[in-house]
Image (cartoon, helix red, strand yellow):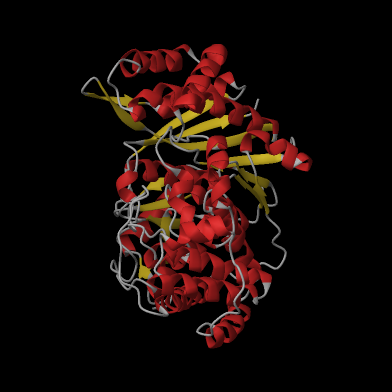
Amino acid sequence: MNAKELSIELYDELTSDAKAMQCKQFFEMKPYLQPFEKHLAIRELEILSDSQLVKTELPNIFGTLVTLHSWQIDSLAYWQRCGVTRLVPTRQALCELSQNIVSSKRSNGGLHNSRRLRYGYHNLHEYRGKFFPQLVKSLINISGAPKGGVLFDPFCGSGTTVVEGIAAGMNSIGCDLNPLSILITEAKSSLFSLSYEQISKSITSFSALIFEIAPEEAQWCDRDTKYLSDWFAKDALIDVQSILYQISCLDKKVQMFVRVCFSDVIRTISYQKVADLRVRKEVKDYSKFDAQKLLLEKVTSQLAQIKAYQDIVPSIESVSPEVIHGDTKKVVEYAPSYKGNVDLIITSPPYSTALPYLDTDRLSLISLGLLPRKDHKSYENLMIGTREITEKQRREQWDWYLDHKHKLTDEINSLIQDIATINHGDGVGFRRRNLPTLLGMYFLNMLEAFESARTMMKSGGKAYYVVGNNSTNLAGEKLEIPTDRLLFDLAERAGWEKVGYVSMELLTSRDIFKDNRGSSESILELVNP
């Protein structure tokens, strides 16, 4: 279905009324938006048009008193059609329709009646806590950051902010400590400078060789081989080795794309319970070449979606995003040239003790040679929001918190002390006993992260932190941990100026980790004075 088929005529009455109101252009808001999304939709259109919107008598139709340029219309995130007497789909609506290559559900005259989050390059890899691309795109608009400006995500995860920044014509920087996050972000970013034809040509050659047995050479150290042997059937592990060898023969950018596709199917061919964040084993049957078949299916599906997306958003030859593998608290050391030069931050920091970050990705990290098993604990200890500590570490880190808690707000310290009073008692399980220490570590680390991020910013630079809350059970009762509000005040302690606070309704997530989400989310709006 093409753009012309998706266009609609405006009613004559609306056109006549519009003349009286002197409206120059009309915009149709997506019909399924939550209240916070409608709020953002109006803000982004009013900022791009530099005028107040006029609400018409038709559902979801607004008018502007000026005519927007095509690049402004292409920037819109939450609007699905626009025009004067005929409404035609926006670029965003067409991008979301490109997801129909792998999902054929449509309605509303051909447009979707529910949000699509996996269009374009955003469907490359499952990732816990994945950002919504429309939210990032909308916040770029609302920020007023210039094209060609610098966008930074200090917790880049699977690269949603970096990708949307590139699409918006910004110089994108991402930072993360998880090597798999870096690979995914680099792979997605590289797709902007690769045409479908280039990728397809390489994949055709790859497909012809993928079922060949690789030369017998060690892919992993003895310890990693032994670990993987416990999590894969013998034939599965042989197939993994063969696939990795064939991938290594590809062009570097295409190689990244295929490695990420392969990472996305590794859980499926292993004994790890697919939808479980914890390390849980489920022995399953494996038939020879199942891994190759699944990978080819994944790559073929992604290629079709890439073509559909690139037909709407052409490749960008000059893309050179900066993707930094390291501790975001020290980002200035890794990227000194960006100090004081960042226009905008859009990020979603880790939940407080909510997710076992490296354990979730451990099979990909080891299989792809990204992080040997022996280094997992040391990396986990560096991660903000970790929940994996020993009893010795708990005691040492609690003392560290007590020595530094004066840096935090009274409300944070009061919450931690209330939890410690109960959880440090006799007969408490180790996870609850660890919680006060983990919270102290989390908030002190986030204070450093706020300070580090601010040193990257221009004066007047804006930041949007999308923060998720979680809860704990305290003495038999549920206790909400209002991480959003606590971090808002902590950012001020780090020198940021508080601008706004937008509560978000929890949106339906379809990723495999949807059952591990927090209780609520908020957008913290900050500015560097």
Question: Total number of numbered labels?
Answer: 0
Query: Could you tell me which residue is drawn at 46 percent across and 11 percent down?
Result: 410
Q: Position of residue 367 (x, y in %)?
A: 52, 62
Is any part of residue 73 visible from this angle?
no
Query: Could you tell me which residue is drawn at 50 percent across and 48 percent down?
Result: 136
Query: Could you tell me which residue is drawn at 65 percent across and 77 percent down?
Result: 249
Q: Which quadrant of the view contains residue 251?
A: bottom right
Q: Position of residue 517 (x, y in %)?
A: 34, 43
Quarter the N terminus occupies: bottom left
Residue 103 in the image: above or below residue 155: below
Residue 346 in the image: above or below residue 89: above
Q: Position of residue 135 (x, y in %)?
A: 46, 48
Residue closest to the eye, 111 or 319: 319
Query: Could you tell me which residue is drawn at 57 percent across and 41 percent down?
Result: 379
Is any part of residue 64 visible from this angle?
yes
Residue closest to the eye, 74 or 223: 223
Residue 243 in the image: above or below residue 523: below
Quarter the C terminus occupies: top right
Residue closest to the eye, 526 or 390: 390
Residue 45 in the image: above or below residue 381: below
| Apparent side of residue 19 relative to residue 247 in the rendered image (left or right) | left
Residue that sits furthest to the right in the current view? 337
Q: Which quadrant of the view contains residue 80?
A: bottom left
Q: Position of residue 81 (x, y in %)?
A: 42, 62
Residue that sits furthest to the left in the current view? 476
